[in-house]
Amino acid sequence: MSFQPLFANAQVLNCNAQLDALKAQFGSIVASRILEAEAADFHWQARVRERYLGQYCDDVFGSGEELSRIAILSQLGGQWHAGVCLADGDGEVETLLWLRSFGDLEGAEGEYDRAH
């Protein structure tokens, strides 16, 4: 069973409003480039479900920081998305490992459920 935070709907609306504001201010092309560059943050804020997958053990840079692998299900820009992020101990996203987009919730939920 997946956990759905109570604040998810407000966050999704806020992220979509931010995306709409970017499109209005800069146009669709620039807004899509901003979304692409900041995808981890946008999808993390727009998540409606998350599931802990385990610790991330790769310490390539020797920082010693412990990161968690988190599967997310998000709704952003009129589409549903499933992916896996790395988050720190404070619950802040560090990076997006992978993301797939779907036109319907069922497809995204299936990919979210299969994430490991």
Image (cartoon, rainbow, N blue to C red):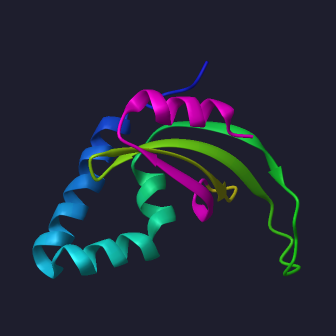
**Residue in the image at 89% along x and 79% along y:** 62
Q: Position of residue 34 (x, y in %)?
A: 35, 77
Q: Position of residue 23 (x, y in %)?
A: 17, 70
Up-down relation of residue 95 to residue 15 (above or below): below
**Residue in the image at 57% along x and 59% along y:** 92
Left/right placement of residue 12 relative to residue 82 reads: left
Q: Position of residue 115 (x, y in %)?
A: 68, 39
Q: Is residue 100 magenta?
A: yes
Left/right placement of residue 67 relative to residue 24 reads: right
Q: Is residue 47 magenta?
A: no
Out of 19 and 30, give the one closest to the viewer: 30
Up-down relation of residue 12 to residue 93 (above or below): above
Which residues are the magenta region?
91-116
Q: Residue furthest left?
A: 24
**Residue in the image at 84% along x and 81% along y:** 61
**Residue in the image at 56% along x and 29% along y:** 110
Q: Position of residue 38 (x, y in %)?
A: 44, 71
- Whether residue 20 is visible here, answered yes or no, is yes
Out of 103 and 42, give the one closest to the viewer: 103
Left/right placement of residue 30 relative to residue 52 reads: left
- Number of numbered discs on residues: 0
Where residue 8 sits, quadrant-wise, is: top left
- Whether residue 6 is visible here, answered yes or no, is no
Up-down relation of residue 11 to residue 19 (above or below): above
Out of 65 and 73, give the one closest to the viewer: 73
Quadrant of the image for the C terminus?
top right
